[in-house]
Image (cartoon, coloured by chain):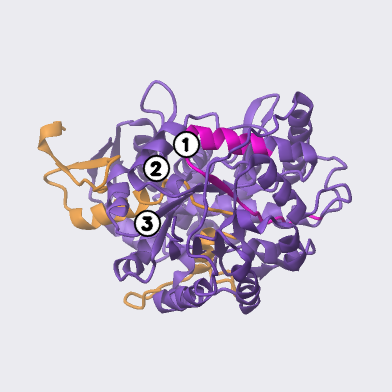
Chain colours: A purple, B orange
Amino acid sequence: MRGLGVGLVYWSALQPLFGSGDAEVLELEPQTLWTKSWTSSRPCYRLNEALFDSIAVLPQPKLIHGVGQPLGGSVDDPLEYAPLLRQMLDRLNPAWVSEHLSFNRTRRQSGVSECGFLLPPAQTPAAVRVAAENIARYGRALGRPVAFETGVNYFRSAPADLRDGKFFAEVAETADCGILLDLHNLWCNERNGRQSVQSALLQLPLDRVWEIHFAGGRSLDGYWLDAHSGEIPPAILDVAAEIIPRLKNVGALIFEILPEHLETIGLDGVQRQLEALRQLWSLRTNTEILVRCPAARSMKPSAADIAQVRAWEIALMNALEGAPGESFKSDPGIGIMRRLISDFRSASLTRGMRFTITALLAALGAEQTELLLSTYLRSTAPDSFVAVESLHFARFLSRRPELIASIPYLAEVLRFEKALLSATLYGSTTELHWSTDPTLLLAELEVGRLPRHLPNTPSRMTIAQ
Amino acid sequence: MNRFDEVALNPQPLPPRVRVMVSHDVAFDLKKMQKVTASVLDRLGCAGCHSGHILDFLVIRDFVVNPKTLDVNEVMPGTGF
């Protein structure tokens, strides 16, 4: 097949660049179009079909980049996802599908626990076999060639670990799959004290690189973060210029930026990144590339392999949750990862319960609100879906009637947002009673102000699916 | 309130659809309510690739509470943010 070109991970804010043709390839993170739903007999994922339709009709060739069922862990998603993903693949017909070589859940005695973040897997021969089997299963379920993304890792390397490049290479060779080379992730790893980019690239089987991700990041507490927050650092473009002529099968160069950071560089800035990628694209030596499903069967992991990988996952999760233990005790990466997870979960609550969070901040101030959020985060397991995390917080707040009664209008705002979440997740119907004009109240909250007294204009509202 | 007497705001134009219904005689701005509700419903899915730093709470915190004085920001009408 011919290489696809340069493109972007899709967000609606980037739509003009797909409309203009500046982005030649559209990469979709399919789970961003999914909600969790409990409206049928068992929990399931549900696709926003109309939004999906609006993306599917765009003329660019599509790639699918999963963010919900990473391939590096000991336990698969307990919710059925393959049929929905296949439905999307049938429509978009991507040349390959990619996912992260990470884990975001594990199995403990109490059942499957979500991590609330993509976490790096153990880098051992056992983890290679576990990941290779996951990749093979994922590819069979989807009927497409699979590439895994070379991940970011904020923890220190252990002496017994396979080095980053060696680990990626062994997974790719064992699974007989493709590699999505995320150069910004490798650069983060180098800047944060792990293997250098050059050294990692020397260990990779370069003919397996089907795609490259580019992004910008930012620093926090001495770490360089894979924040997808701006322009591609020049050092990464230099590395790409060196390596691309040696990649026989690279089929797409994709720039990633989160929509909340778009205003930092603007659409003009994104166009400049695409132009830089087009220059890199011209350095390829092959226009025809080979992307394929695995020819060989992967090596099955043993029960001992799975147990070893799971033990490492549980140790990492325990350390992140603050449980006492020797593992990771002196690793400063635990601190930064706790901060990232906490801010990620707080961001989810801000998205799903913007008006409630604003009312809390305006009434309690930053310190008390952060203390309240911290109590919630410690007491409640995370969920990567905004609606689920937000409904958990709504229930947490509902168990604090004195707090709610002490803040003007909080009870009404909370009931309103909780009703929207319940309708989305459970199909529930809720009747609300407003004491005042909700548009006046919400407009005040939108500008960061909690009103004390609004005119008394009672009304009723029903929220349903 | 009889369901047939209600106005459906349909804040989420794309399915899966959550409906918000109010009686005909409400005094508030239905279009504004529709916009506000849609803005919440639009962001309830999976948050996307997340291996970096997601800032939504920090942004809204500094929007509502002045980080220098820790005072709740008082916004004068018309100045906006």
**Quadrant hosting residue B7:** top left
Among the two numbered marks 1 and 3 on one chain, the one whose residue lies closer to the N terminus: 3
Do the residues at pointers 1 and 3 share their chain?
yes
Measured Cα–Cα span from mark 3 to mark 2: 12 Å
Near-viewer residue (A377 or A455): A377
Which image quarter holds the N terminus of chain A?
A: bottom left
Residue type of the residue flagged with mark 3: Pro
The stretch drawn in magenta includes residue A142:
yes
Q: Position of residue A410 (x, y in %)?
A: 42, 48
Callout 2 environment at 10 Å: few (<14), some (14 to 19), or many (20+)? many
Provide the residue designation for mark 1.
A142
Q: Locate residue A245 relative to residue A80 in the image: left or right.
A: right
Near-viewer residue (A284 or A179): A284
Task: Name the residue rendered at 38%, 31% in the picture.
Answer: A426
Provide the residue designation for mark 3.
A61
Q: Position of residue A389 (x, y in %)?
A: 51, 42
Task: Name the residue rendered at 41%, 32% in the picture.
Answer: A83
- Residue numbers of the magenta segment: A131-156
Among the two numbered marks 2 and 1 on one chain, the one whose residue lies closer to the N terminus: 2
Label 3: element kind? loop
Task: Name the residue rendered at 66%, 42% in the picture.
Answer: A378
Provide the residue designation for mark 2.
A89
Label 1: element kind? helix
Dots 2 and 1: beta carbons under 8 Å? yes
In which chain is the residue bearing label 1?
Answer: A
In which chain is the residue bearing label 3?
Answer: A
Q: Locate residue A317 relative to residue A426 in the image: left or right.
A: right
